[in-house]
Amino acid sequence: MKSGKKKAEKVIVSLVVSAMVVGSQAGGIMAAEWKPEGGLVQIAAASSYQFDDVPVSHWSHRYVTQLAAQGIVQGRDEGKYVPNDRVSQEEVIVLAIRLMGLEQEAERVKTDNYVLPFSVSDYARGYVVTAIEKGLLNIKEESSGSPSEGKSWGTSSASREWVAKIVIRAINKQSEAEQKKSKSTGFSDNNKIADGNIGFINEAISLKIVDGFEDNTFRPDQAVTRAEMATFISRAQHHNSFQPDKVLYGTVQAITGSSVQVTDTKGQSRTLNINSDSVIYGEGNDGKISWSGIKPGYSVYAVVQNNSVNYMEIKEKVSYQTVEGKVENIDLSAMRLTLKSGDKSEVYELMSGTSVTDKNGSGQSLSDVLKDSKVEIRFTDDRKIAHITIKEAPINKTAVGTFVSVDKESKKLTVNENGLGKQEYIFIDNVPVKYKETVRSLDHLFEGDTISFRVENNIIVEVEVTSTNVEVIKEGKLDHIKLDNRASYLTIQFADGRFGTYSYDNNFVEVIMPWKLSSSIAELQVGDEVTVYLDADNNVKKLFVKERIQTVSYMATIEGYDNKTKYLIIKKNNVPEIYQLDDKISLTYNGNSVALEQFESMFAIGKKVDLTYNNNDELVNIALNIGYEGVISMINPTTKELKLKMPNNQYLDLKMNTFVGVEAFNQDNATLDDLKVGDSVKAIVGPQQDYVYSMQKKQTLSYELISKNDTNRQITVKDQNGATKSYNVPLDAKILSAGDTSLTFAQLSPGSKIEITYLGKSLHQVKVAP
């Protein structure tokens, strides 16, 4: 159905365009098609983005260089740009389509399916068709005009007023232009501008994309040159919502050697290389400068390829101040840092892009900045910290290990600390020893106990016992589960027919489903084969679910719900079905458990839900999801169709939005073209659950664990090529043994082989390799 619908749409467009051709045949015979000589829109990328006939002294050098570095414009075959040549209308359309980020779509157009109302060169047909479909070109407007003498519509010279209109449409500023259509441009030749173009010219002038001449004329009919066109496109790009992969906007954080560290608008830090071919321009009308003119704090625009700067310009100069002191407090939730320098304490604001290094220049994170650390900060005039250098860090940490012994006379506690081996620490008088909700003395520590201890300035100030005995293991089939927070429990049936009922805490019980990256207690289903791990009080701490057979009906629509009777009306495949909800049907909202009494408020009418059925075709779960994890079975960036093979081996068909953000590990500016059949992904749908708006690629890589830092949960690993890298393991990341049981960060052992799973750019799971 989907491919047939798309084909029908193309046929309709073709018929409409054909009808326009028939209606315009009285306008004269179309000129023979012109073949480009390799100019402004030459398809093959030029080997250089600088041209002999556009030297630094040429007024358009910055604009031509900026676009050539992106591949938007190229030179002639002989390596010249020829800035004074006129630009044709079809060349303008190609540039506008590139500006909109639609070049790949235009290149895929099968132009044999279309008949155009005017003649264009073969290379430009797909671009012109795309321009018509996207509203960039109005067929009626273009058919009413007449091409230049001896030229086709496509090869006719583009006028200033026509270019202004096309560029404003390309950056989606039509509504702003509409509001300005009744306002005079103020030029002395305003009466020569077509009425329909007044608003577009006013908007282009207000955005400083185009301007007039010194004699206060606009000269709407004057042909636009290649140099002028590059200028218009370059200026327009800064107002465009779409930005090419090579383009980066950001703030300079540091400059070292021949590289510059920039934090982009998403808060990501990037190190960019500067070389002899890098072209750098100053702010505003400032000319070309050396790269030493770039300073920390400056806002910059850059064109980057393979982390090397081809072009950079200063957008705004912001100066930094520097001060050293001791951290009195750092609040990452409020993003504030209090620094004491001398006798004075000052509060500074942290930014999402605040970078941190140690005194040797190695990258750190904000979580490494501890109270009492000696630091140097660089901050702006409005007291926002751009960079922190940790000069000296105190020994403050929370660590985990196995208790060995205690010497009360010398006040020393010996622990076999994870990652460090046997260590001795002094402890404070009456150090509290916590176990569950009670406080014990040091006498109640036993050799082999697993403890967590907090160290402040080299002294243990608190101990918590996390494990004092071997956990009890039970296996069976889940018979019943009570999910509300008042008295949560589950019942399993053992192989001999007996039953066991155990309590659990929703906030602490860990559920492992090997076929999923993450899971919750709410996803358990009656009939699941489970292994239950109990503490000394028979409370469930961990639960392992064996492989299950289930079916899911995706994207059913909620039609109605009666909170009193608990009757739910669902439309599935356009057929209504009625269910009565009870505590045997689990409810999840984006993976989180939902109580039955919350259903009406969280599962609104019109929302789409996924229905899970057990082997007996009984409804066991209703889930409202904003993301789906699966393996790509089919992906078509042109028709925006996506098919995922789900963990239960079913298939899910999804429709993608016009623009879909793609996130992949070790790959900046990823696009849909970087995804292929067989890739594991998480597809995120929008609020209406109708289109996929973003995709996160799931990747698992093998490493050797070299070292780890328990304080900031940082691991250093070596990949298969021998390169070492450091990563911070998020608190919500899963850490699993080779047998898929849960581990703590402290239980990771240097020297072991591990597998790290990334979801997008985020570290999602660490698993010890078999």
Image (cartoon, rainbow, N blue to C red):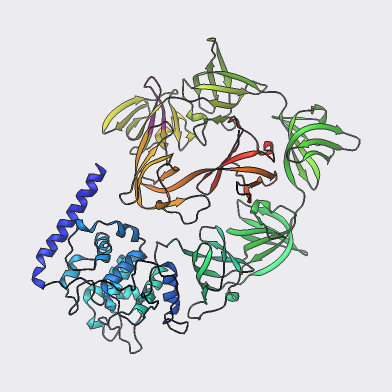
Q: Main secondary structure of the magenta part?
A: strand
Is residue 481 visible to the viewer in this orientation of the structure?
Answer: yes
Q: Is residue 316 above or below residue 217?
A: above
From the top left corner, tell me how far across and down residue 524 is, in percent. Answer: 49, 26
Q: Give, as a single range, the part of the protein colored magenta.
A: 610-622
651 sits to left or right of 419: left
Q: Residue 87 falls in which quadrant of the image? A: bottom left
Residue, far front: 78
Residue furthest bottom as drawn? 215
Please, which residue is most extreme toward the left here? 26
- Between 177 and 249, the one nearer to me in the picture: 249
Give how far across and how far down residue 359 sits, in percent.
Answer: 72, 60
Q: How many marks?
A: 0
Tell me if residue 521 comes above or below residue 461 in the rendering: above
Position of the C terminus, as image quadrant, is top right
Front-most of residues 126 and 513: 126
Q: Position of residue 617 (x, y in %)?
A: 36, 22
- Identified at 39% across, 65% down, the residue is 240
Residue 613: say if magenta: yes
Q: Let me know if residue 179 appears in the view.
A: no
- The location of residue 657, given as percent across then percent down, is 35, 50
Q: Is residue 615 magenta?
A: yes
Q: Is residue 80 left or right of residue 639?
A: right
Question: In percent of the image, x 81 and y 30: which residue is there?
Answer: 441
Q: Look at 38% across and 74% down and name the residue there.
A: 75
Q: Is residue 434 left or right of residue 681?
A: right
